[in-house]
Structure formats: structure tokens, C-alpha cells
């Protein structure tokens, strides 16, 4: 487990900011923000001993699995960036291949075959059948 | 009598070839993802939501509901064979289902869970048929203040009764409500919290939020924790599935008790099938003459929770359809889907959209019968599914998430938001903040604000309206009791090993 400490604190800060960004006809949002800040403060208060304890041991090991995290995020980002510019097929294949890198020892052939099948099937279902306005190849 | 004629009308709606087709697609898909560990029914329902925009509301709802209860049938398969629950409510089935399969009684266990699921489902459908119209009649007199209070109760129940810290649940509900505020304010037309992003003007996209919090977060969790679900190799034939007379004896009453508990829990706002299965299991263990059997392949230990599971899933439609107040995150997505279709669930639904309401009810029964057929003779096929490796599954699911979210508004920003929510949900999961209350709060947020403001307008801005009206006061009192209870009980309930229900 990584540092619950900083995180709970970070969440609390995020909440507090939320209360000040209140705007417009914001009676209800304001009330909710206050509730949220109070709750976050309570959680922080109750978990403080645990947070202290963790903060001490935190330096020891920080073994967050970045590889799958980056692969999955990268896959989705690839789609976001590519779908409208280079077209459906490239975006789909880039996304599937990137995501598949999350696990060590990728089996290139099967990944590519799968990406191809998904892209073609997805194209027919969503673009041809459901009329999603994307070009096959930009 | 009137009920019967309405029901027969419902069957007419649900027996058209189209409706049958979508019911079949829904339950098959449901079983499919139910069997596969690592893909939740919520992800699938959110994925299919955009597809239903092109359908008639009835067909869409039949399909989405089919996924939901179909998944509950399928989820026991992986629990029994691999000791990995196909979905959170089936976690309890592992306790006795897996030992049964170690003893070579996997076939019997699968048979029993299927029959128990069917019994539980049917029981709750009967309840739905006779109870929902009564509740709707009663609810028609509810005022804005009453609605507000029911939603307060539902949200409190959802956040405090789920596994884990009630405080964190409440914080998540508040965050969800706040996120529900994003977009154009209905009263003044002003933009709130849009940060100048045009895609946020209509509010955060429900599909993007649900997919991010559950779909993407689930995949991130599985991959970073290294608990990639393992593929299994099992063969089950129909012959192995016939239970012995002793099994039947153990099965009969536990299954009925499970159905009863499940229906009751399912009807309450804010409680999902996970709680129902845990309670059913605990109940059986208490009632049993030899509780030491449990955990070593007791038939009661799988039949009661499975019956409760399916009963609660069907019964959950009662508050959603008649009050418009969903019981858990999945029903919240379903409610969101209906709202997008321009249908506002509530007491009027039963009378004004009678064809829709009764059509859906009738389809439940048809769906359950299809599931019985799908799950008994064809169980071998589903078992084979378990041999699909996760390394192929998750990229495919991600692909569907991307294109699915994109297709809602044909908008890349939504996909980006999905990623942001995915990382958020992943982060929350790691720190014990349950995502389900957030989603529930998100869907109920706008409804709550609307009713809150309307109630205040009607009462000349007097907050007393919430306690003066007996119905509203009763719900608020229940909320208070629940809060006190959950904080006092918290110390004793440390059994939060189970994942928050996806």
C-alpha cells in the first residue's frame, strides 16, 4: 500500500477547493460543498494516526505498477488523439496494441490479429450500423 | 383481475419477435460477462446504453435488464469452478461452491445455483407484479418534499450499508451529488462547474462516468494488483448435474428463505444484491442444525445466497420503476438510461406507460426462462468461456469502452473524461472509497435539487415542510436511525474484505 496519508490529505484539499469554486445559482452546490469539506475533514481526522504510521514506512517501498497503468491510459489517450484525425482503424489498432502492452511478454502476433479483428468488427457495428461519424482511414 | 389483464398485455409486448430477440441478446450477454471474472455487469450495461438509444425504450430496457439479471446467473459459475467470483454478489458462493467442486460435485452445484436463481427471480417477479402497482398508487400522492426525503434515505442507505467505512461512503455520495450539479442549471440556465468546456454544458456524461469509475478502474485494478484472473479448464456434462435426494432436501427451504430475504433487501432503496447474499448466507448458517458444514460444500450455502441474489436483482426494479429512486449503482445507470429516453420513472409510469411497465415485467419472466435453458443444457459452453485468457479480454473491453463512450455524443472529450474518471475511480478503490455511492449520488443529484427547491417554493422557503409532512418526516427519521446505527455498528463489522459492489 502506498501513502494513504498524502492521498487522504489531497482529497480533502480537492474538496475544499471545490467549495470555493461554487458559482451561479449555487445554493445547493454550496451546501453540498460544505458537507463534503466537513466529511473529508472527519475522515482525515479519524485516519490521522494511520496516515502518520504509513508516512513513516512510505519511503521504504513504493512499488506502484506503472507499466499497466501507463499502457491502459496510453491506449485510451491514443484513441482520443487519433480517432478524429487518422480515422477509425489506426486509432483502434493503436489503442488495442498499447493496452495489451500492460502485461509483460506481449505476444505480438495474437495481439495484432486481435486488434485487426476488433477494428473491423467495431467498424461495422458502430460506423456502418449505428452511424457513428468516423472515417475508416483519415 | 385487472393486474392479470395488464400482465397479459405485457406479455403481448414482450413476446414480439423483436422483444424476444433483445431479451435473448440481453440475457446471453449477461451470462457471458457474468461468467467471466473481471468484467462487471455495470460496465456492460453502461457500454450497451448508447446502443439502446437507437432502440425503442421498451426494447432497450428489456435488453439492459436482461444483462443485469443474466449476469447474476452466470456469476456463480466462476465462483464454483475457480473460486473467483464472476461478480461481487457471487463472492459468497465461493465459500461453499468451490469446496463442492473440489469434491467433484461441481455439476450439482451449478445445477442448484441455476434452479435457485430461477426460484429467487420468479419469487421477486411475482412480488413486483402485485406489489409495484400498489406502491405506485400510494406514491402518487408524494410531494416534492417526500421525494427529497426518500432520496436522502436511499443515498444514506447506499453509503452506509455498503461494505467499508460509512463515512467514506457519505463523502462519496456528496461528491457524486456535486458532480451531478455540473452543467446547465435547470432553474436559471446558468452554467455551473463547466470550466469553459463545452462538452460539460449538458452535464457530465453518465456513460463516461460509469465506464470510467467501473470499467476502466476495474481493469487498472486487476492489472496493477497483479491479480489477473486465471483461465480455467473444466468440463461439465449434463449428466453430472443431477442432485441427489439429500441435496434436494437441503435445497428446497433454503432456496425459499433466500428468495424472501433477497426480495426484501432488493426492495429497500440503497441496498444491492451483495448485501442480500451476505445476509442470506448468514441466515442459513444460523438456522442450520450443523453450521460446521458451511464452508465445506453445504448445499444451503449456495442455494440461499444465489436465490437471494436473483430475487434482490428483480426486486430492485420495484423502487426504481415506481418511485424513480434506484437502489444501487446499476439501477442508477438504468434510471439514467430511461431519463435519456425521455421516460421519467415514477408512480405515473405504471399507469401512463403501462405498456412499457408491464412489457418489461413480462420480459423478466421470459428472460428467466431463457436463462434456465441457456444455463442447464448449455452449461458446458459457458464453462469453456472461462478458458479465454484475460490478456485478450481487457484490451477488447477497453476498445469497446472507447468506441462506446465516443458514440454517445460523437465526442472525444467524453473519452478523455472516461480516462480521468477511470484514474479517479482506481485511486478511490485503492483507498477504500466506494465508487457506487458516487454514481448513485450523481444520478440522483439533479432530481434531488429539483425536488428540494420545489418543496421550498411550495412552502414559502420554510424548511419545516420536510418534517411537517408525515411521509417525509418518516423517511428522514429512518435516515437518522440508519446513521446512528451504522456508526455504532461500524466497530463490529470489519468484514470489508469483499470488494465494494461494482
Image (cartoon, coloured by chain):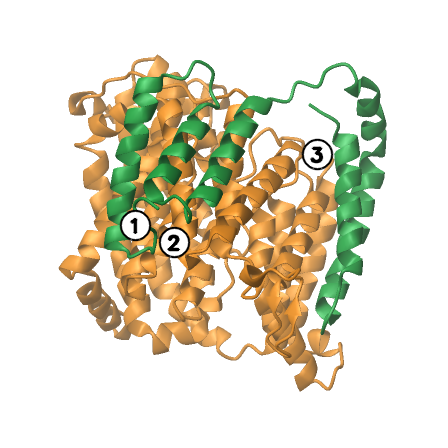
Chain colours: A green, B orange
Q: Residue B238: x, y in percent?
A: 17, 25
Q: Tell me whether the residue at label 2 lies in contact with that at label 1, contact meaning CB atoms closer than 8 angstroms.
A: yes
Return the chain for callout 3.
B
Q: Residue B117: x, y in percent?
A: 33, 40
The lab-note entry on whether marks 2 and 3 share a chain reads yes
- Left or right, residue B267 beside residue A30: left
Q: Residues within 10 Å of mark 1 (few under 14, many from 20)?
A: some
Identify residue for label 2: B407
Q: Tell me whether the residue at label 3 lies in contact with that at label 1, contact meaning CB atoms closer than 8 angstroms.
A: no
Q: Secondary structure at mark 3?
A: loop
User: How far is the residue under mark 2 from the one under mark 3?
Assistant: 46 Å
Above or below — where is B125 with respect to B256? below
Above or below — where is B92 with respect to B118? above
- Left or right, residue B197 beside residue B385: right
Image quarter of the N terminus of chain B: bottom left
Q: Secondary structure at mark 2?
A: helix
Camera-side mark, 2 or 3? 2
Identify residue for label 1: A126
Mark 3 or mark 2, which is nearer the start of the sequence? 2
User: How far is the residue under mark 2 from the one under mark 1?
Assistant: 8 Å
Camera-side mark, 3 or 1? 1
Q: Nearer the viewer, residue B374 or A134?
A: A134
Identify residue for label 3: B492
Q: Residues within 10 Å of mark 2 (few under 14, many from 20)?
A: many
Q: Residue B32: x, y in percent?
A: 30, 36
Res. B298 in view: no
The lab-note entry on whether marks 3 and 1 share a chain reads no
Q: Secondary structure at mark 1?
A: helix
The lab-note entry on whether marks 2 and 1 share a chain reads no
Farthest residue, direction left: B17
Amino acid at each position: 500500500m502506498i501513502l494513504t496519508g498524502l492521498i487522504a490529505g489531497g482529497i480533502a484539499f480537492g474538496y475544499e477547493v471545490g467549495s470555493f469554486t461554487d458559482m451561479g445559482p449555487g445554493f445547493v452546490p454550496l451546501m453540498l460543498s460544505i458537507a463534503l469539506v466537513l466529511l473529508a475533514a472527519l475522515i482525515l481526522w479519524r485516519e490521522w494516526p494511520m496516515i502518520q504510521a504509513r508516512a513513516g514506512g512510505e519511503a521504504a517501498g513504493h512499488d506502484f505498477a506503472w507499466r499497466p497503468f501507463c499502457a491502459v491510459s496510453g491506449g485510451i489517450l491514443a484513441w482520443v488523439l487519433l480517432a478524429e484525425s487518422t480515422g477509425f482503424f489506426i486509432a483502434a489498432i493503436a489503442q488495442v496494441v498499447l493496452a495489451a502492452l500492460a502485461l509483460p511478454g506481449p505476444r505480438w502476433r495474437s495481439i495484432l490479429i486481435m486488434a485487426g479483428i476488433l477494428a473491423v468488427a467495431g467498424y461495422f457495428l458502430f460506423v456502418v450500423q449505428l452511424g457513428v461519424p468516423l472515417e475508416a482511414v483519415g | 383481475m385487472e393486474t392479470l389483464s395488464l400482465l397479459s398485455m405485457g406479455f403481448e409486448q414482450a413476446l414480439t419477435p423483436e422483444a424476444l430477440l433483445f431479451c435473448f441478446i440481453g440475457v446471453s450477454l449477461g451470462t457471458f460477462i457474468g461468467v467471466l471474472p473481471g468484467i462487471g455487469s455495470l460496465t456492460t450495461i453502461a457500454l450497451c446504453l448508447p446502443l439502446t438509444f437507437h432502440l425503442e425504450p421498451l426494447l432497450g430496457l428489456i435488453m439492459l435488464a436482461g444483462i443485469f439479471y443474466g449476469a447474476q446467473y452466470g456469476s456463480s459459475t466462476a465462483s464454483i469452478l475457480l473460486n473467483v467470483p464472476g461478480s461481487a454478489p457471487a463472492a459468497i458462493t465461493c465459500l461453499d461452491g468451490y469446496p463442492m467442486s473440489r469434491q467433484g460435485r461441481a455439476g450439482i452445484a451449478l445445477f442448484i445455483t441455476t434452479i435457485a436463481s430461477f426460484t429467487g427471480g420468479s419469487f421477486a417477479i411475482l412480488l413486483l407484479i402485485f406489489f409495484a402497482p400498489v406502491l405506485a398508487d400510494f406514491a402518487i400522492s408524494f410531494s416534492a418534499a417526500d421525494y427529497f426525503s426518500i432520496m436522502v434515505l436511499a443515498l444514506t442507505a447506499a453509503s452506509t450499508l455498503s461494505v467499508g467505512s460509512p463515512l467514506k461512503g457519505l463523502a462519496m455520495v456528496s461528491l457524486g451529488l456535486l458532480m451531478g450539479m455540473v452543467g446547465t442549471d435547470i432553474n436559471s440556465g446558468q452554467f455551473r462547474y463547466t470550466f469553459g468546456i463545452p462538452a460539460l454544458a449538458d452535464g457530465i456524461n453518465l456513460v463516461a462516468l460509469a465506464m470510467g469509475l467501473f470499467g476502466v478502474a476495474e481493469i487498472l485494478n486487476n492489472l496493477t494488483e497483479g491479480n489477473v484472473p486465471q483461465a480455467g479448464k473444466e468440463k461439465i456434462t449434463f449428466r453430472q448435474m443431477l442432485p441427489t435426494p439429500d441435496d434436494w432436501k437441503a435445497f428446497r427451504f433454503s432456496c425459499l428463505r433466500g428468495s424472501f430475504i433477497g426480495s426484501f433487501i432488493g426492495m429497500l432503496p440503497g441496498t444491492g444484491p451483495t448485501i442480500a447474499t451476505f445476509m442470506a448466507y448468514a441466515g442459513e448458517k444460523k438456522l442450520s442444525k450443523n453450521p460446521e458444514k458451511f464452508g465445506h460444500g453445504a448445499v444451503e450455502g449456495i442455494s440461499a445466497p444465489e436465490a437471494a441474489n436473483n430475487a434482490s436483482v428483480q426486486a430492485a426494479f420495484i423502487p426504481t420503476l415506481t418511485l424513480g429512486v434506484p437502489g444501487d449503482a446499476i439501477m442508477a445507470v438504468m434510471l439514467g438510461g430511461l431519463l435519456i429516453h425521455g421516460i421519467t420513472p415514477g408512480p405515473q409510469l405504471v399507469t401512463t406507460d403501462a405498456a412499457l411497465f408491464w412489457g418489461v415485467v413480462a420480459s423478466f419472466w421470459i428472460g428467466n426462462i431463457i436463462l434456465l435453458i441457456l444455463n442447464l443444457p448449455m452449461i458446458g459452453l459457458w464453462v469453456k468461456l472461462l478458458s479465454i485468457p484475460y490478456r485478450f479480454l481487457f484490451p477488447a473491453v477497453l476498445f469497446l469502452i472507447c468506441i462506446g463512450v465516443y458514440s454517445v455524443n460523437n465526442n472525444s472529450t467524453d473519452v478523455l473524461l472516461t480516462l480521468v474518471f477511470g484514474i479517479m475511480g482506481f485511486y478511490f478503490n485503492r483507498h477504500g472509497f466506494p465508487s457506487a455511492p458516487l454514481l448513485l449520488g450523481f444520478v440522483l443529484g439533479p432530481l434531488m435539487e429539483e425536488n428540494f427547491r420545489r418543496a421550498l417554493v411550495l412552502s414559502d422557503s420554510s424548511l419545516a415542510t420536510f418534517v411537517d409532512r408525515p411521509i417525509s418526516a418518516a423517511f428522514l427519521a429512518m435516515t437518522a436511525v440508519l446513521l446512528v446505527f451504522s456508526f455504532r455498528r461500524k466497530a463490529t463489522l470489519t468484514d470489508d474484505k469483499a470488494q465494494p459492489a461494482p
